[in-house]
Amino acid sequence: MLPTEIQNLVDLVRAGTGGDATFKALLILLQNSSESSHIDRALAQIDPNGIAEDDLRRDAAELLARADAADLASLWNATLQTSTERNPLDSNSNIVSLHPGSAPAAETTHYGQIVTFDDVGGLDKVIRQIHRKIIRPFENPGMVAKFKRKAGGGVLLYGPPGCGKTMIARAVANQVNAQFTEVRAAEILDRYIGVAEGRIADMFTFARANRPHVLFFDEVEALAQRRQFDSDYKVNTVVSVLLTEMDSDRNEGILMLGATNLPWSLDSAFRRPGRFDRTLFVPPPDKIARAFIIRRLLDGRPVSDMLDLDALVQRTTGFSGADLES
């Protein structure tokens, strides 16, 4: 499903309203999209022969090629009157160049205290699942109660480091107007027996007194590692206390999000229903997402008009958001 603002422009283009100017506005919006699937889903609905300007059809074909929609790009290329190749990031292009000024201003950025889903690039599929599995139950507790379920529980985010798991957790808390607590193993674990267990209990007590609440366990495998009969006693007791607190019937309105790069290292007990029973993979950004992230990172910095960000996007395959920022 396309974002409303994109679908509205697609409908206007199909209806012939506004002519090529409307289509140009659509291309600019797609250029700034954080999800490559928006590009092919939007342009697949439009007949390229209905676009009068050859340059605009060429821009659409180049945008589709960058989004890895080769078949659809060929369809648009087949309608071109000329075959002159041109850099889509050239200053004379109808598509706005990939410099910070072309990106729509976000409500907030991930450098501030508040993070929204507008700050998360290239994770539309993950965000849609989060809306369905997390946000809707929080916003509709009555509907959840009818099915004898509780608004809360646990979700495990896993994937390579630096790909946005912490940003997603903060955006979830902001979306549901919940208080956010980031739990780090280094701040919980202690060499003295009983201290870590007490900190875990205090943390859940605080969350229950401040609902709705998001508890975000960063690098959760450090707290939830597999228990072994011959392993350290302190590790086993910390895991046991954490499991007990997660199972409490007083956790209504508390969402537990865990982030890990090593999902297989978690104790199997944490994957039981009611704990981290929902799992979401957070992948590295694709080309469109990397362009989105780079634009955001350059926002507010002096940038030359000659900077070829398309070349940067091509050279950063496999980079995480943290890699791009560095």
Image (tube, rainbow, N blue to C red):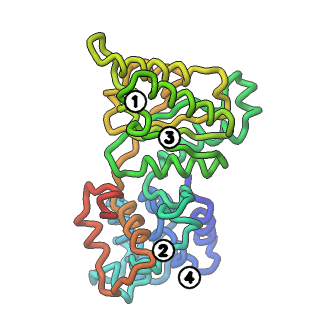
Residue type at numbered disc 4 = Ala
Neighbor class of circle 4 (other Cα within 10 Å; few <14, some 14-19, many 20+) is: some
Residue type at tag 3: Phe
Q: Is residue 113 among the parts visible in the rendering? A: yes
Which numbered mark, 1 or 4, is in the foreground of this view? 1
Q: Which residue is mark 4?
A: 21
Q: Which mark is residue 298?
A: none
Q: Tag 3: Cα neighbours inside 10 Å, few (<14), some, or many (≥20)?
A: many
Instruction: Tell me whether the residue at label 2 lies in contact with that at label 3, contact meaning CB atoms closer than 8 angstroms.
Output: no
Mark 2 touches mark 4? (CB < 8 Å): no
* Nearest the eye: 85 or 25: 25
| Residue 186 found in image quarter | top left
- Name the residue furthest front: 192
Q: Amino acid at mark 1?
A: Leu
Pointer 2 or 3: first along the chain = 2
Q: CA distance from mark 2 to mark 3?
A: 30 Å
Which quadrant of the structure image shows residue 142?
A: top right
